[in-house]
Image (cartoon, helix red, strand yellow):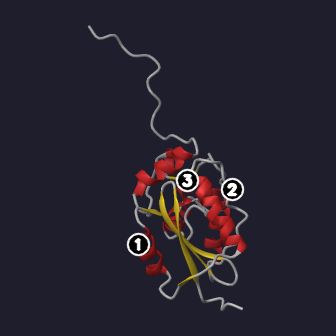
Amino acid sequence: MMDRRAHCYLIFETAAGFCSIAWNSVAITRFQLPLRTAEAADRALLRRAPDAKPGAPTPEVAGAVAAVKRYFEGEETDFSGFTLDLGELDPFLARIYEAARRVAWGHTTTYGALAKELSAGPEAARDVGQAMARNPVALIIPCHRVLAAGGKIGGFSAPGGSAAKKRMLALEGVHLEPPPPAQQSFQF
């Protein structure tokens, strides 16, 4: 049996680039959003899980890989059923991640709304934002669906920053640009 602390990982290609996923004997522990090359995905994962070794995916990890590939092909995908092992988490942080996992494909929420859903005060919106920035399994915990106040894009700590967040939301049919004016004025 694999040690819970020991990690295996896999680099795989999607329509958006190369992703990496890591797991232990319990569940998925890390996920890296797409990068341009397999080498970059490998380096990014090993920075966060330096003792991880390449391995053959478990059936659940293989399912997650297939789901990620479908996602980046634009197919509606639900990641909420995948088991995660994020180590010892502060109970409030665990609740934030659980709430974020409930934000479905094509929907968004805000840092403040997520804090309110957790019965926390408005000051907890900052905690939600920090949790999203430290998310070790972006996409599986869909932090890209959590926006700043007023539905603004906000930050995104993944490669490509807020532009990557916009592209991911666009895959889901969410467009954050203001709509074109309904009527244009005459120019004389």
Q: CA distance from mark 2 to mark 3?
A: 12 Å
**Residue 101, percent across and down?**
66, 61
Q: Which mark is residue 92?
A: none
The disc, 1 or 3, on the residue closer to the chain's N-terminal end is 1
Q: Which mark is residue 78?
A: 2
Q: Tell me where residue 97 sits by quadrant.
A: bottom right
In the rendered view, tell whether residue 8 sits above or below residue 81: below
Query: Label 3 is placed on what type of residue?
Result: Phe
Circle 2 residues within 10 Å: few <14, some 14–19, many ≥20: some
Q: CA distance from mark 2 to mark 1?
A: 28 Å
The residue at 65%/72% (across/down) is 94
User: Which one is closest to the eye, mark 1 or mark 3?
Assistant: 1
**Residue 21, percent across and down?**
56, 72
In screen coordinates, is 161 left or right of 91?
left
Q: Quadrant of the N terminus?
A: bottom right
The disc, 2 or 1, on the residue closer to the chain's N-terminal end is 1
The residue at 66%/71% (across/down) is 61
Circle 1 residues within 10 Å: few <14, some 14–19, many ≥20: few
Choose between 100 and 83: the one closer to the eye.
Answer: 83
Report the residue marked by disc 1: 39
Which element is circle 3 on?
helix
Report the residue marked by disc 3: 72
